Amino acid sequence: NEIRIFSPATVANVSCGFDVLGFCLDGIGDEMVVRISKNKGVKISKIEGYDLPIEAHLNVAGVSAQALIDDAKPDVGFEIEIYKKIKPGSGIGSSSASAAGSVVAINELLGRPYNKTQLTYFAMMGEAMASKSYHADNLAPGIFGGFTLVKSVEPLEILELPTPHNLYAVIIHPQIEIKTSEARALLPQKVNLKDATVQWANVGSLVHALHTNDYGLLSRSLNDIIVEPHRSKLIPFFDEIKQQTVKNGALGTGISGSGPSIFSLCEGLESATNIEKTMRDIYKTTGITFETYVSKIN
Ligand code: HSE
């Protein structure tokens, strides 16, 4: 009657794939306990870690749980405890982890009536409250694992992509908050056709690189000429981090989701550890508090 789950952090966009590409981080994430209650509906009974709304209808985990409940109409209700480890506004899918975790847990407690795409759909209702838009590029990798591509949101279609066997992500999280809704408001409504051509060629070649374990092609695909130029100004020392990490052997570096976290992809643990050091060395001199993570992508 009770389940404890781990809901992982994720990196959305992966440079060129705004709103469509994402991957799952290993070992970084929130914990949640969900239990069946005789009171119908959903109640958030506890939140530890960060100050977030406890009212279910104002909490992404509550809203996504309610979307599932409205569809399943179970005879019972659910009580959720959230042990938040991912800082809200960090750019590694904090709201998405809460939204995904609650529906995955409730689905387990109900005997798995829904598949992963359906769960992603319910979670999207919660995520939309936080980011003010319907996108699933953090939710899908959190629920499916590995790399995913959201082929379409309406109807929701998610593709699971393969991960090259020795691929690592390095994340630096400067402790400033960027709200996804605000980072989205900065973006242009229209893009230039020439830029779009470059961008979709990169998305296609990145997907091909994942399928063929082609690290060189992966590296050449990790570019974002549409979104990054608008958002990178919000992130202190982004250009320095990007330049130095790529110089020191990262396959590519970009903004994680809507920032402020920055991610690099690396071939092998040794390179990832070296890139983590590069990032730390740059940020150490800035006076800004930060955390770094190294994660294998599975
Ligand atoms: N694709 C989203 C964005 C991810 O970049 O705004 C953050 O939720």
Image (cartoon, grey):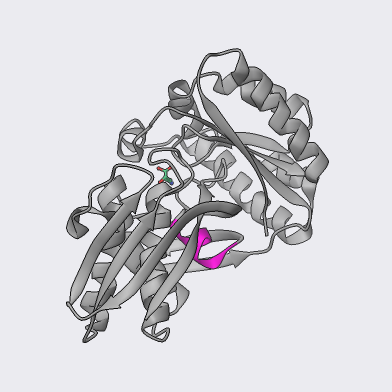
Which picture quadrant has residue 124? bottom left
Residue 142 located within the stretch drawn in magenta: yes
Q: Is residue 67 left or right of residue 158?
A: left
Q: Would you place residue 119 above or below residue 63 in this image?
A: below
Q: Horizontally, is 156 left or right of 164 in the view?
A: left
Which is nearer the eye, 27 or 20? 27
The reply to whether residue 155 is visible in this rendering is: no
Quadrant of the frame with the C terminus = bottom right
Residue 20 image offset from top left, x and y in percent: 49, 53
At which x and y percent is residue 185? 30, 34
Q: Residue at x 36, y 37 (%)?
A: 190
Query: In the rendered structure, does residue 1 fall within the stretch colored magenta?
Result: no
Quarter residue 2 falls in: bottom left
Which region of the structure is painted magenta? 139-145
66 left or right of 165? left
**Helix, strand or loop: magenta stretch:** helix
**Residue 220 drawn at (x, y percent):** 72, 39
Q: 179 or 4: nearer the eye?
A: 4
The quarter of the rendering in which ligand 1 is drawn is: top left
